[in-house]
Each structure stands twice: as structure tokens, then as C-alpha cells.
Amino acid sequence: MYTKVSEFLQDWKKESETTFKILSNLTDASLQQKVTGEGRNIAYIAWHIIITIGEMMNRGGLSVDAPAEDSDPPVTAEEIKSKYEYVANSLGSEVEAKWTDAMMSDELDLYGEKWKRAFLCEALIKHEIHHRGQLTVLMRQAGLKVPGAYGPAKEEWSNYGMPEAR
């Protein structure tokens, strides 16, 4: 768990860059891709990632400039990518301006439970990683290239002198 604001910000920078890289590979045509007819589509999941940054972190005492929880996703991939970048940067600026290392152990009332601020940070990052994984599956189904997150994606193996993974 995070004990310093800088630890969270370092992880947030890395993870948000990875999310941005993945969102950058979306196309307008791919936004409606679903696993099943009743499932969530790419646009919904990407938008959920974005709005949750504000929803969760504003409960932790910040004023992240993010879309409302009940807002509809944009209709273009470019709008989703741009809004993500803006909201992710807003979060970083808010944390730098308002939180101190001593505040990381503060207890907050969140979702009917007591969470330390450090756990809130961890939960946000894990939430984003979880939904990013869902996006990459839908992206593959939509025929999009999926960039590697914690290592090369199958299409990137050749960059390392290895045959493409199956």
C-alpha cells in the first residue's frame, strides 16, 4: 500500500500512460463491440474508466474535473482518448496540490466502508487495470491491434527478435 503521495503518482503516471496507449488504438467503428448482445461495449467500458476517476477520487477529497457519473460516452474514439488524458492529468494535479504523505493513512467513509486514502489509490489503479483488460479482449474481437501493457503483445514480439505468439 502507498505510504507516500509520490509512490501513487509514479504508479498513476505509468498506468495512465498504458491506458492512454490502449485507448489510442480504438476506432470509431470499434466502439460498439460487445462480447454478447447484453454486454457492455467498448465505448461504455472506456467511459466507465474515465468517469470512475472523478467519482472515486472526489470521494477522497479531491476535485477532479471529470464527466458526471450518469453521462453518456462520446461517439468518437478521439473524444474518449482526449477526455481520458484530460481527466488523468486533472487527477495528478489535484493529488499533487491537495494531498500530503501524512494524509495517506487517513480513514475515509467510502461505499459504506472505512478505507485508508492509500487503499483508495490502490483501488482506483486496480479498477482501471481490470477494465483495461476487458477492453483489450473486446479490441481483439473487433480486429484491433492491442498494444502491450506489461510486456509485448503478440504483434510486438518480433520487435524483440521472437516469433509472433499464437
Image: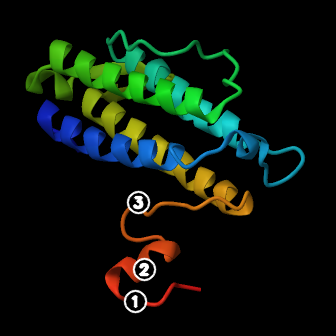
C-alpha distance separating marks 2 and 1: 5 Å
User: Mark 1 sits on what residue?
Assistant: 162
The residue shown at (79%, 49%) is 34
Q: Quadrant of residue 100?
A: top left
The residue shown at (78%, 41%) is 32
**Where is 151 relative to 158, above or below?**
above
The residue shown at (40%, 71%) is 152
Is residue 48 shown to the viewer in this render?
no
* Picture disc at residue 157: 2
Specify few, some or many for label 2: CA neighbours under 10 Å numbering under 14, 14-19, or 20 or more: some
Is residue 99 shown to the viewer in this render?
yes
Classify the position of the C terminus by image quarter.
bottom right
Q: Is residue 88 left or right of residue 14?
A: right
Mark 2 vs 1, N-terminal side: 2
Q: Position of residue 87 (x, y in %)?
A: 41, 22
Which mark is nearer the camera, 1 or 3? 1
Specify how the rendered protein is coloured. Answer: rainbow
Specify few, some or many for label 3: CA neighbours under 10 Å numbering under 14, 14-19, or 20 or more: some
Q: Position of residue 115 (x, y in %)?
A: 35, 29
**Is there a contact, CB below 8 Å, between mark 2 and mark 1?**
yes
Amino acid of disc 2: Trp
Amino acid of disc 1: Met
C-alpha distance separating marks 1 and 3: 18 Å
Which mark is nearer the camera, 2 or 3? 2
Q: Farthest right residue?
A: 37
Q: Position of residue 121 (x, y in %)?
A: 32, 34
**Where is 132 relative to 165, above or below?**
above
Mark 2 vs 3, N-terminal side: 3
Mark 1 vs 3, N-terminal side: 3
User: Mark 3 sits on what residue?
Assistant: 149
Q: Is residue 101 left or right of residue 71?
A: left
Q: Secondary structure at mark 2?
A: helix
